[in-house]
Image (cartoon, helix red, strand yellow):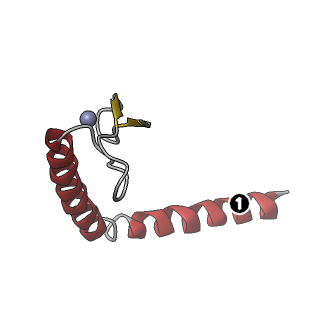
Amino acid sequence: MDTLYCACCGRPFLRASSRGPAPLYCSRDCRLQIAVRRRAWTALENASARHAEPPAEPTVIHWSRAAGGRRALGQRA
Ligand SMILES: [Zn+2]
């Protein structure tokens, strides 16, 4: 029998049968855990995607200010 490692808790477990695709999780609990986590990750990704756009503006302002400062230094030299 193959020894597999659970994709959820990382515990080694024995594959019960060699038929069908190899199981990823040691138990149904772990499969449920991942399903819950995946749902949470998807929700987080959607939330961060919605929040990712506003901070882009201050970065542009910061960069143009940095370029202006460098230009002022160049004129002085
Ligand atoms: Zn597990």
Would residue 69 be found to the left or right of residue 62 on screen? Answer: right
Residue 76 position within the rendered picture, expressed as x and y whole percent measured from the top left? 80, 58
Residue 68 position within the rendered picture, expressed as x and y whole percent measured from the top left? 63, 66
The quadrant of the picture occupied by the N terminus is top left
- Residue toward you, 6 or 55: 6
Residue 15 position within the rendered picture, expressed as x and y whole percent measured from the top left? 34, 40
Disc 1: CA contacts within 10 A as few (<14), some (14-19) or many (>=20) = few
User: What residue did someone put label 1 on?
Assistant: 70
Q: Quadrant of residue 14?
A: top left
| Element type where label 1 sits in the image | helix
Residue 2 position within the rendered picture, expressed as x and y whole percent measured from the top left? 44, 37
The residue positioned 72% from the left and 65% from the top of the image is 71
Would residue 59 be found to the left or right of residue 72 on screen? Answer: left
Determine the quadrant in which ligand 1 lies.
top left
The quadrant of the picture occupied by the C terminus is bottom right
Task: Using the image, determine if residue 27 lies above or below residue 41.
Answer: above
Q: Quadrant of residue 67?
A: bottom right
The residue positioned 51% from the left and 61% from the top of the image is 62
Would residue 21 be found to the left or right of residue 61 on screen? Answer: left
